[in-house]
Image (cartoon, rainbow, N blue to C red):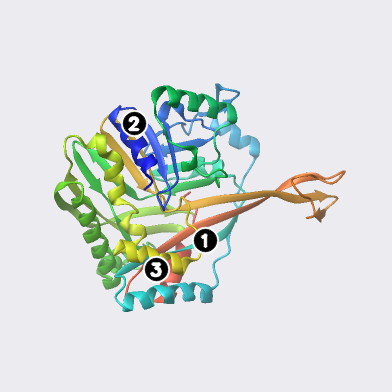
């Protein structure tokens, strides 16, 4: 993780000021804000009921002032009676090529477990904000733009006065907007102990005896055991008295395609008394999360880079809130990002793709070319079957409502 990010987290935690942090997979980009400084046009969050909005009443930011509106009224004006949702699953042969890279490394002894992910085109008639508000999830985040120039000037002036420096290079100049509705807790800190909740093992809840099938599946059990052992090691780097408090319990996730079962465990350790002064280093020692990389981490990340062929960005990074000595954070899985480009112009049903630099031809109005991508994946072990892993990835591409 970049030193500027570590320093900023340490500084805010030491000052005991409540703040939100969002860190990408590589640990070199971050969005960090005091809770009181978050612009809802820039970021919306809801972590187990704590957020900067409510379902019954949404607060929007307009010209520097707060204006209260009812979410119910806003959605009724859009008159979206039915959600449309389509996915363009990756070709099986393409997935198989990536799978084979991973599997050959596992069989060669380079990795025991590798989390292979895909970037899948999807289409939906809802905006990212509408998905955020409708989604049911333990941890929800919508991050969509940088501050305005005026906001940046005020922020930089304030940081200069406080001698606090988180360089703007830590957040991408052209941030790709995304919404995340994650079921997976990363770490919690409470009462001087740090807790981790790795989630590994997935099965369709509608299958006969689904819970029994999941708990008795040797491949899923081996995958889960590997991650629990990895997390125990990660926590031991920053804590004492590390122990597994709960092992392989079942969570039920609700999706637009039906319920999914997933297994989790709870692992904890005792932190030193001065841990707020070293919160950045504590998080760095756990990153990237074991559940979305594998074991051993460093070599497995090299395998992931070769097999996946795309930049994960903020997907599989972490997001969290620190407040008064307590931390609640999540792994950013179940993730949709949006790419737009103002190159599509329409008039009388005809399309003209020749516009340059955002300039429309006479008589034509710009129409944003919107593309959505859902990022999903799963763990590969020596026991993995390519077809089953492919189907599991498709199963994880859903809307949680």
Classify mark 1: residues with Cα within 10 Å, few (<14), some (14-19) or many (20+).
Answer: many
Above or below residue 265? Residue 113 is: below
- Tell which circle, 2 or 3, labels the residue nearer the N-terminal end: 2
- Tell which circle, 1 or 2, labels the residue nearer the N-terminal end: 2
SS under mark 3: helix
Q: Nearer the viewer, residue 13 or 363?
A: 13
Above or below residue 222? Residue 164 is: above
Q: Is residue 78 left or right of residue 282?
A: right
Q: Residue 367 location in percent, x, y?
A: 73, 46
Q: Residue 193 location in percent, x, y?
A: 19, 41
Residue to which mark 1 is pinned: 119
SS under mark 1: strand
Q: Is residue 346 left or right of residue 197?
A: right
Residue to which mark 2 is pinned: 12
User: Residue 320 — which label?
Assistant: none
Foreground label between 1 and 2 = 2
Q: Residue at coordinates 43% horizontally, 62% vertically from top-left? A: 377
What is the CA distance from the residue labelled 1 to the residue labelled 2? 34 Å
């Amino acid at each position: 993780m970049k030193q500027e990010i570590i320093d900023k987290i340490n500084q805010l935690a030491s000052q005991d000021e409540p703040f939100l942090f969002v860190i990408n997979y590589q640990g070199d980009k971050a969005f960090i804000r005091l809770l009181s400084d978050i612009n809802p046009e820039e970021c919306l969050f809801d972590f187990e009921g704590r957020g900067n909005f409510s379902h019954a009443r949404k607060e929007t930011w307009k010209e520097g002032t707060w204006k209260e509106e009812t979410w119910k009224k806003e959605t009724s004006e859009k008159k979206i009676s039915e959600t449309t949702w389509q996915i363009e699953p990756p070709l099986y042969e393409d997935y198989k090529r990536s799978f084979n890279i991973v599997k050959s490394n596992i069989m060669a002894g380079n990795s025991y477990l590798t989390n292979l992910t895909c970037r899948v085109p999807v289409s939906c008639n809802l905006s990212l904000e509408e998905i955020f508000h409708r989604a049911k999830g333990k941890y929800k985040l919508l991050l969509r733009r940088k501050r305005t120039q005026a906001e940046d000037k005020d922020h930089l002036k304030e940081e200069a006065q406080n001698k606090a420096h988180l360089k703007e290079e830590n957040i991408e100049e052209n941030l790709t907007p995304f919404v995340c509705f994650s079921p997976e807790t990363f770490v919690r800190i409470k009462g001087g102990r740090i807790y981790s909740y790795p989630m590994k093992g997935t099965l369709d809840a509608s299958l006969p005896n689904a819970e029994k099938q999941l708990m008795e599946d040797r491949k899923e059990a081996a995958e889960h055991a590997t991650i629990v052992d990895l997390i125990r090691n990660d926590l031991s780097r920053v804590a004492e008295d590390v122990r597994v408090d709960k092992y392989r319990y079942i969570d039920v996730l609700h999706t637009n395609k039906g319920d999914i079962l997933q297994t989790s465990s709870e692992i904890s350790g005792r932190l030193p008394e001065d841990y707020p002064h070293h919160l950045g280093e504590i998080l760095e020692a756990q990153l990237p999360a074991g559940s979305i990389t594998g074991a051993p981490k460093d070599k497995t990340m090299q395998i992931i880079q070769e097999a996946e062929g795309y930049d994960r960005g903020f997907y599989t990074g972490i997001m969290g809130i620190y407040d008064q000595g307590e931390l609640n954070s999540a792994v950013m899985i179940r993730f949709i990002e949006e790419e737009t480009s103002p190159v599509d112009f329409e008039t009388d049903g005809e399309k003209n793709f020749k516009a340059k630099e955002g300039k429309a031809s006479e008589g034509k109005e710009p129409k944003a070319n919107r593309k959505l991508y859902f990022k999903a994946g799963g763990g590969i072990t020596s026991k993995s079957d390519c077809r089953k892993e492919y189907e599991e990835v498709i199963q994880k591409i859903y809307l949680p409502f």
